[in-house]
Image (cartoon, helix red, strand yellow):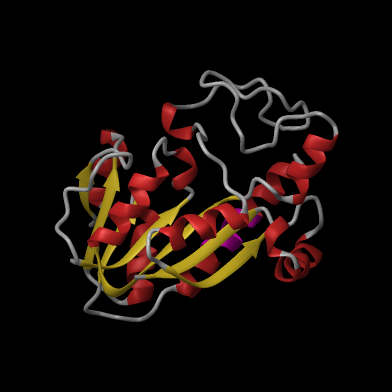
Amino acid sequence: MKLISQYYRAERKNRAVILNMTEENPGATLLDCGCSNGDFTTKIAYRIGTQSVYGIEFIDEIAKEAEENGVSVYHANLDCEFTIEDDTVDVVIANQIIEHLYNPDQFVKEVYRVLKKGGYAIVSTPNLASVHNLFALLFGKQPFPAHASTELILGNSFDPKHGLKHGSKGEIHVRVFTYEALTELFEYYGFGVEKTVGVGYYPFPDVIAQGLARIDKKHAVYLTLKVRK
């Protein structure tokens, strides 16, 4: 239970980091990739100051909720080409999305394509090389975010979710990144990496974890990047 509570606190902190990385721009067009029900999307839009808010979501029931929250939603799979014109978006958000994709290269190329020159993307994902994942490997366990089965969570008896079934296919992590892999992927496709932040540092308590994540972001729970075209 303690690990679960730490997880939710780290998740909230990571969302705060994403909001702080945005830039005020009332004229901006925002695209939230994997917008879910739109709750966080609308918070990002409010922070930026824009009313031009779009999202991509492939689960129809959830996409409908996002539309009810004022997000214009493209019902699509992020492994495919976006049905969005070139150079039309100012800000792309991809929070806890890239690890679910079978073709992250395609995704990064599409993000680059739709962004205007000078536009930026904020990308956040679990860190394969986090301290708690390194300890899991040391004890012969599966890293927490690296899913070995498409049916259930297995291979790590330390995980509070061990033995539970995945809620949906959208919850399965296909590729999990280290700091170096994530930054090199975006640089390879032409992005400049402006800022990288580490969030969370299991199993340490919040105050200590925040300090450790600042000092050693390459082993934090979450990796969050701001990249610019």
56 on left or right of 36: left
Q: Quadrant of residue 47?
A: bottom left
Determine if residue 208 is in view. yes
Residue found 40% across the figure and 66% down from its top: 191
Q: Does 121 sit left or right of 11 as displayed?
A: left
Task: Name which residue lies at 49% across and 49% down.
Answer: 96
Residue 185 lies, with reference to residue 20, above or below; the image says above
- Magenta segment: does it hold 53? no
| The N terminus lies in quadrant | top right
User: Taking 145 as reference, is 52 left or right?
Assistant: left
Residue 187 in the image: state x and y as whole percent.
Answer: 45, 63
Image: 180 above or below 78: below
- Relative image position of residue 168 (x, y in whole percent): 44, 27
What residue range appears in magenta?
Answer: 10-15
Q: Quadrant of the C terminus?
A: bottom left
Rendered view: 147 above or below 175: above
Viewer-closest of 46 and 177: 177
- Is residue 35 among what the camera can see? no
Image quadrant where residue 52 sits: bottom left
Question: Residue drawn 78% across and 43% down?
Answer: 134
For the image, the number of numbered tags is 0
Residue lying at the far right in this picture: please name it: 139
x, y (%) of residue 153? 62, 24
